[in-house]
Amino acid sequence: MRHITICREPGRYAGWPANYGIWNWGNEIVVGFTYGHHDSDAGFHTRDRTRPFVGMQARSLDGGETWHVNPTPARAPGDKGMSADEHMAPELKIGADEPVAIPEEPGRIDFAHHDFALMAARNGLRAGAVSWFYASTDRCRSWDGPYALPDFGQTGIAARTDYQVSGADECTLYLTAAKPDGGEGWVFVARTEDAGRTFDFRSWIGPEPDGFSIMPASVRLSDRSTVVAVRCRGEATDFRDATNWIDLYRSDDDGLSWGYVNRPAPNTGVGGNPPTLTHLRDGRLCLTYGFRDAPYRMCARLSPDEGATWGDEIVLRDNGGGHDIGYPRTVQRADGGIVTIYYWHDTPDGERHIAATIWDA
């Protein structure tokens, strides 16, 4: 295994790739993240809430060996940072100055374009959260949008990027809604069959949780079958006391209904961590996630049978500086090597930075 630094600067805070997305075309890989400032006294996440976060993209043309980092070429509503409102003071949030206004309809999107990418974004996590998306047909060098996602009749929508393309006009989104009581969150499926002009609610994934189920990570196995890994948390007065884990669900009727499969990661540490799920070219599933208790580490598990069983935990990296790590994205590059990208720090007060581990399964 080899560890590579993608974006690191003293005094800065780079984080949460899982909130933005990863896209790859052979050895060309693009990953999104957000970039702010470090504050040692800020609590669970050592970010400076008084200064804005901005969207960033890192691009590699050699399978993750070297990277170039630039601001995300996409306009957020109000020209503010996207998908980071919970980490900023109220006056810096999208919608702080005026109601969020997003064009409703993008026109026809060609989801099957060979250079296509989609990125989802949001301005919150609970009731009142608004979400939108962007589309690119030049490998993330430019983004069209933002385009509004509907509220699907829910109290709020907290979109992260997870989607499956099944045709030029058809794309399925895996999203998180605020629960009926306004709390965070419950995963569901939405679909467009008219090239992005409209999106319809399709199904809930699992029952309404006592705590939350959020941040789905999907793999399409066939025209009818899909598996989705979900970040879960039990109910607790203080989130630090809650149990956190990852569950797996499967649909064999094209996303109309879902059955519980198993719990591939029964503990992801204090605060929890989202999964990323990758379909390797040999047919195996690869699950990657961060573990937020000592020894703080990045982990993987492999399944040879579409998630029915899972191998032992593989430690990709350990001895992190604390719990403020993870939120990975994983792709397989042209030579079969696996590239897992996450945020990390080496010492308790070290700057949070974006790193990659290149490894073989």
Image (cartoon, helix red, strand yellow):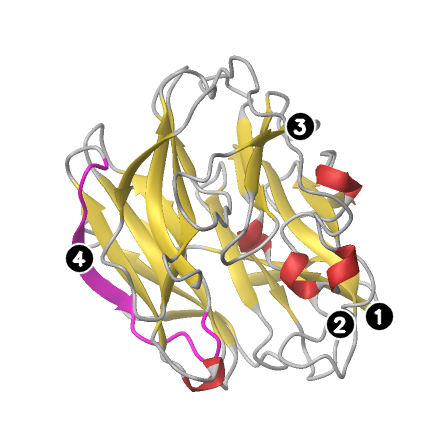
Q: Main secondary structure of the magenta part?
A: loop
Rounded to the nearest whole Å, what is the CA distance between mark 4 and mark 1? 43 Å
Q: Mark 4 sits on what residue?
A: 261
In front: mark 3 or mark 1? 3
Viewed as shown, does residue 296 lie left or right of 280?
Answer: right
Q: Is residue 95 above or below residue 291?
A: above
Q: How many numbered marks appear?
A: 4
In front: mark 2 or mark 3? 3
Q: Mark 2 sits on what residue?
A: 351
In the image, which residues are magenta? 255-272
Q: Secondary structure at mark 3?
A: loop
Q: Earlier in the sequence, mark 3 or mark 4?
A: 3
**Classed neighbour count for the residue bearing mark 3: other residues with Cα under 10 Å, few (<14), some (14–19), many (≥20):** many
Residue 16 seen from this side: yes
Say whether residue 329 is magenta: no
Q: Mark 1 sits on what residue?
A: 11
Q: Secondary structure at mark 2?
A: loop
* 261 or 74, nearer to the observer: 74
Q: x and y percent of residue 305 in the render?
A: 18, 50
Q: Mark 3 sits on what residue?
A: 143
Rounded to the nearest whole Å, what is the CA distance between mark 3 and mark 1? 29 Å
Report the amino acid beneath label 1: Gly
